[in-house]
Amino acid sequence: MHEIFTHPALQAGLLPFIAALLSAELFQRLRLSGLAVIAGFAATVYFASDFNIDPLTETHKIIWLGIGASILALPLTLLPWAHWRTLLSLSAAIATAWAFWDSLQQRALVDALAWGTGCALYAAWLVFWFDELREKSVAAANAGLGLGLGSGCAALLASAYLPGRFALALGAAAAGYLLIQAISNTRLACGRSFTLPLALIAALAGCSAVLAGQQPWYTLPVLALIPLAVRIPVPERWTIWLQSLALSLLSCACAGAAIYLTWNKGAPLF
């Protein structure tokens, strides 16, 4: 039984998918279905890592920043303010610098500034553009699916196994959240409880894999295109199945490009 629950496909695929399905359905009437993404992530953390605070490692920082983002997102729905999007993006940049502070300190000053700035901008970018999808549950779910799969598979190819599982858990959770909408042909509540933790955790997982030195840095700009790609307008008369098919092709194309670049690292880009 222990071997079953330690299998990567179960930890990063099936378990977060089931957890997201159940939580999305359970919280549907409370309009908190967006919690599906953190439920799926937590399921993977439980079996693949731990929730310890001491020692506060880079992995534990990623976990608790993700959980903190999910908790923070709940009251924001009750406090409408035009500038939350900008503030959250800035906060994500600062949180990213803090998460990788120890790794950056081991580099030369110029390198540390370059890598730290790049990772902070990547996190801020994802949080900023995912926040625009908070009222578009189908687009947000497809973006989460592509970003989770792309970040996760690229990280695994780069031998960043734990960040890879975290990112894949996000993709699996987004798939479960999307499946309920496709089957019922009804949009679920989304909100920042879905978009904020998903964007932040995916950004941190991707940066962790890149800073480890195995995943090429130029995969991150490719993955950053995903929340923009799903903004393409699709006919409202289409069923959610058809809308998801169109949007998933776009998001997964970006994910596939990032995976290919990681697999083919070292080859000329042009």
Image (cartoon, helix red, strand yellow):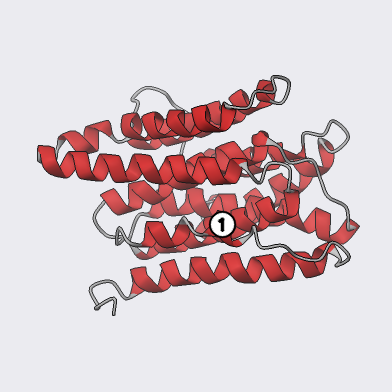
From this view, report whether residue 158 is shown above or below residue 54. Answer: below
Which residue is pictured at 63% across the width and 49% down the height? Answer: 16
Residue 220 in the image: state x and y as whole percent.
Answer: 39, 56
Residue 262 x/y as whole percent: 35, 68
Q: Nearer the viewer, residue 87 or 170?
A: 87
User: What x and y, as percent, mark residue 225?
Assistant: 49, 59
Which quarter of the rendered picture does the C terminus lie within?
A: bottom left
Q: Amino acid at mark 1?
A: Leu
Using the image as rendered, state which of residue 21 and residue 96 is in the foreground.
96
129 lies above or below 262:
above
Residue 197 point in image, percent of width and height: 56, 37
* Nearer to the camera, 43 or 209: 209
Give the crowd class for mark 1: few <14, some 14-19, many >=20 residues within 10 Å. some
Residue positioned 36% across, 71% down in the render: 261
Is residue 177 left or right of 223 when viewed as pictured? Answer: right
Q: Which residue is mark 1?
A: 228
Please state if 100 lies on the left or on the right of 189 as rendered: left
- The quadrant in which residue 43 appears is top right
The residue most toward the front is 82
**At x 53% / y 56%, what residue is drawn?**
147
Query: Mark 1: which secondary structure?
Result: helix
